[in-house]
Amino acid sequence: MSTTMTEQILEGGSLPIIFICVVVISPIAEEFLFRKVLLERLLPYGSTVAIGISSILFGLSHFNFEQLLYTVFLGIVCANIIVKTGKIRYAI
């Protein structure tokens, strides 16, 4: 019987470490990647283009069609926050 890497991590890892990685580190890393790096690099093409592309890529990065619409919507909201305020901490 084969196990996935996720199953191996969950079976062998400590609960506090898993919690910190999933609830704290992953969302912060996503925001830096999609809002700080990608959004800022796309802003010279216009805020609408930058927000649209970064949000679609954010949705697709979750590899789940059922989550696609609301992750893209969340990406649009967070990207707008970054564009309007210039601060990533509000999106995190």
Image: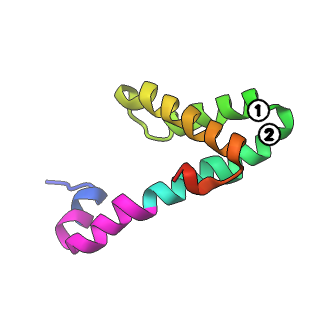
Left/right placement of residue 32 relative to residue 6 reads right
Helix, strand or loop at label 2? It is helix
Left/right placement of residue 89 relative to residue 7 reads right
Look at label 2 and name its amino acid.
Leu
Q: Is 48 included in the stretch rendered in magenta?
A: no
Q: Which residues are magenta?
A: 9-25
Above or below residue 42? Residue 11 is below
Residue 32 visible? The answer is no
Q: Which image quarter: residue 53? A: top right
Q: Are marks 1 and 2 in contact (CB under 8 Å)?
A: yes
Above or below residue 53? Residue 29 is below
Above or below residue 51? Residue 85 is below
Image point (30%, 73%), residue name: 17
Q: Which mark is residue 47?
A: 1
Q: Which image quarter: residue 78? A: top right
Residue corresponding to mark 2: 43
Disc 2 crowd rating (10 Å Cα; few below 14, some 14-19, many 20+) is some
Q: Position of residue 15 (x, y in %)?
A: 21, 70
Look at label 1 and name its amino acid.
Ser
Image point (74%, 28%), residue name: 49
> Which residue in the rendered view is the most extreme toward the front?
85
Left/right placement of residue 38 relative to residue 16 reads right
